[in-house]
Amino acid sequence: NAGVTQTPKFQVLKTGQSMTLQCAQDMNHNSMYWYRQDPGMGLRLIYYSASEGTTDKGEVPNGYNVSRLNKREFSLRLESAAPSQTSVYFCASSEVGGINEKLFFGSGTQLSVL
Amino acid sequence: QKEVEQNSGPLSVPEGAIASLNCTYSDRGSQSFFWYRQYSGKSPELIMFIYSNGDKEDGRFTAQLNKASQYVSLLIRDSQPSDSATYLCAAFLSNFGNEKLTFGTGTRLTIIP
């Protein structure tokens, strides 16, 4: 079982470039999430999708957009990358949201914006 | 005050000893608590969750919750070098109706052979 698959694993962008991070899960989970992890800041939620067809902002949504393409796939787009977006990005999924929100994470994307 | 607070460490524990990791949270209405383990350069992995006051045991791991003190801990018995990792505490905070899962910044644990 693949679980949560993220691509790419590494990416270097120049300021102002755009890119899309792809995420897919094969566990038939309803909820999907995008987090970023920065040293000393912990994991911070960017956007989430509680179910197919819905998306909501998390703690740090500025500069990002998302698409819940279907139940399996949830993509994160940076329209105009900035150095402040240099981070490790994790996609995650959960069977349900709320108090039973048990997250399964993808392997992460190391993004550097120069 | 951070919503979920952990000592960043590093915490060094001899092999075979008990490692004790602690976490406090700000919202008295929080209902669920999770411990994730993250090896260096890898993604977080859920290892324990607890909803009720008291202890919950799973193998060498015990999660302890004290809602009155707003305190959750993770004990690792018979620590092994393979337990060396960063441990992330997370709480589902009610946050004045804006419910969300909030992570602490993690405690780095090193098991010394």
Image (cartoon, coloured by chain):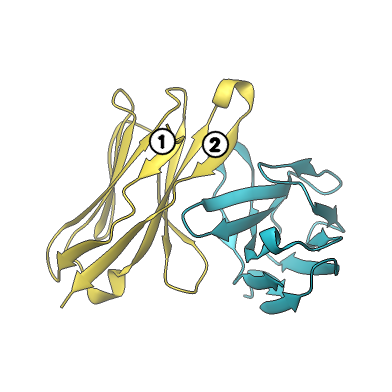
- In this structure image, what is the colour of chain A? cyan
Residue B65 in picture, x, y percent from top left: 31, 36
Q: Which chain is yellow?
A: B
Dividing the picture into quarters, in which one does residue B12 lie? bottom left
Q: Mark 1 sits on what residue?
A: B51
Question: Could you tell me which residue is drawn at 80 percent across and 44 percent down?
Answer: A55
The image quadrant where one finds the N terminus of chain B is top left
Image quadrant where one finds the C terminus of chain B: bottom left
Q: Amino acid at mark 2?
A: Ile
Instruction: Pinpoint residue A47: horizontal percent, then vertical percent.
Output: 73, 48
Q: Alpha-carbon neighbours of circle 1 within 10 Å: few (<14), some, or many (≥20)?
A: some
Q: Secondary structure at mark 2?
A: helix
| Residue nearest the viewer, comparing B86 with A50 | B86
Residue at 69% of width from left, 42% of height from top? Answer: A58
Instruction: Residue at 46% x, 34% y: name it.
Output: B3
Residues marked 1 and 2, same chain:
no
Residue occupying image coordinates x 44% and y 36%: B2
Q: Are marks 1 and 2 in contact (CB under 8 Å)?
A: yes
Q: Which residue is mark 2?
A: A99
